[in-house]
Amino acid sequence: MTRSLENRRILLVIGGGIAAYKSLDLIRRLRERGAQVRPLLTRGAQEFVTPLAAAALAGARAHTDLFDRADEAEIGHIKLARDADAIVVAPATASLMARMATGEASDLAATVLLATTLPILIAPAMNVRMWQHPATRRNLATLLGDGVRVVGPNDGAMAEAEFGPGRLAEPNEIAAALEAMLAGGERPGGFGFLAGRAPAGALAGRRVLVTSGPTHEPIDPVRYLANRSSGRQGHAIAAAAAAAGADVTLVSGPVSIPDPAGVRMIHVETARAMLVAVEEALPADIAVFTAAVGDWRPAEVGQNKIKKDGSEPAPLRLVENPDILATVAGRSSGRPTLVVGFAAETDDVLANALKKIARKGCDLLVANDVSASGGVMGGLENTVHLVSRDGSVETWPTLDKDEVGRRLVARFAALLPV
Ligand code: CTP
């Protein structure tokens, strides 16, 4: 066990849910990595685990009540909110998330979470219906917008004999997410905390393949079918992966932005050429399909410029292009460990994204709303939703595409098995 959290001071807020028993194991996992853990139990948590057990495992007293006089004399709630390197909330119940999202300071845990400027990692755990409820989705989006990091929930059988996302992430996963947050946090302190940068060298020794830009599907030597993709998001991901130490191949359709530094560039025009370039660039540990690949191409390509001849224009007959993402995700051998797709949607963004992740067979889908009003296609900013196979969705605040690229790369690095 590496002592990756040596001397890190962690305030562990334990919420009131059946998963609270796992937080005792989490204390041990954090301590074996060298962390100093100070537990704080909500009233609900104390129905499931005792402050004594938490204190015994932490080797530190457990905090429980806002108006505990001894507590306030020894260490006030404001000090609790400051006197650590990070706060972990595990389990983060629906109610605790709601209190955090609305800034309600009704008990010690919520007060500390409101008063703090420390980076916060939450590990949600609740019934699957509660997790999927629009209210929880809204609260999650708010918390993410505030810079809170999230680990889990995982898929699995729940205490109520239901199945789906809602299970607390495993203690080792929470510890790893905490390590990543502390390593990547370039701005500890404040709700503007951007926990998104992959630690230097996080992708050292890894191969990353990225597709970017539009494709041009020729009609004749001078005309083509294309789309409004600028390539900014894909290029930003490639640049961030290179900055994290990866060996990056960027396969790009025709764009007017410069090639990012430090990546192997392959310029292509058509979807079919992109597929060939992608297959030649494999194997890779991570493959990210950001390109807005033309779904169709003209069935016949004029050898010479098609002329007006005064009669009805000839109809443009289209045939479907190969699906590059689905082809790579479906490979039986040599499939990249992590296959990430993008979903360009103009309506029902999340519902369509959930269907698309299943259809394409990728591990993660980054959905963005590309309706004209949002200005995403060709623009500098992006609002993305990260959709996992288990149906969990994370909505990120609107960020410039470079920052989205850095955050995505940090996430990919965290998802790769060591
Ligand atoms: N993609 C691909 N090859 C294609 C079409 C799409 O690799 N021929 C990839 C894109 O790079 C993206 C994902 O598939 O990662 C989804 O692209 P999108 O345009 O949203 O979906 P489509 O498959 O085109 O489906 P639809 O247009 O019906 O929504």
Image (spheres, helix red, strand yellow):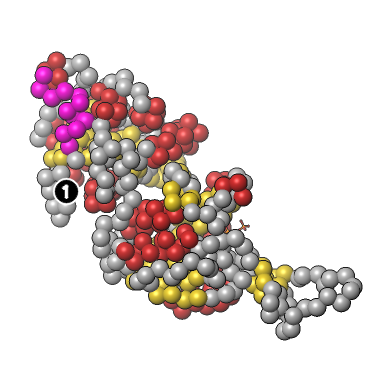
User: Which corner quadrant of the figure contains ligand 1?
Assistant: bottom right
Q: Which residue is located at x 39 percent, y 27 percent?
A: 102
Q: Is residue 365 left or right of residue 205?
A: right
Whether residue 319 is situated above or below residue 56 in the rendered picture: below
Task: Identify the residue shown where x is 67% and y is 68%.
Answer: 225
**Residue closest to the eye, 418 or 52:** 418
> Is 77 within the magenta?
yes
Residue 134 vertical position relative to residue 363 in the rendered view, above or below:
above
In the rendered image, residue 140, in percent from the top left (x then y), is placed at: 42, 37
- Check the picture and name the quadrant holding the N terminus: bottom left
Assess disc 1: are there few (<14), some (14-19) or many (≥20) residues with their C-alpha within 10 Å of its C-alpha.
many
Query: x, y percentage for residue 397?
Result: 44, 43
Q: Which residues are magenta?
A: 73-84
- Above or below residue 417? Residue 260 is below
Q: Quadrant of residue 401?
A: bottom left
Confirm if mark 1 falls within 8 A of ligand 1: no
Image-based side of 183 in relation to 75, left or right: right
Residue type for callout 1: Leu
In the picture, the quarter occupied by the C terminus is bottom left
Residue at the (45%, 69%) spot, across then down:
258
Residue extending furthest toward the right: 311
Indicate the secondary structure of the residue bearing disc 1: loop
**Residue at mark 1:** 5
- Whether residue 158 appears in this view of the structure is no
Q: Is residue 154 visible?
A: yes
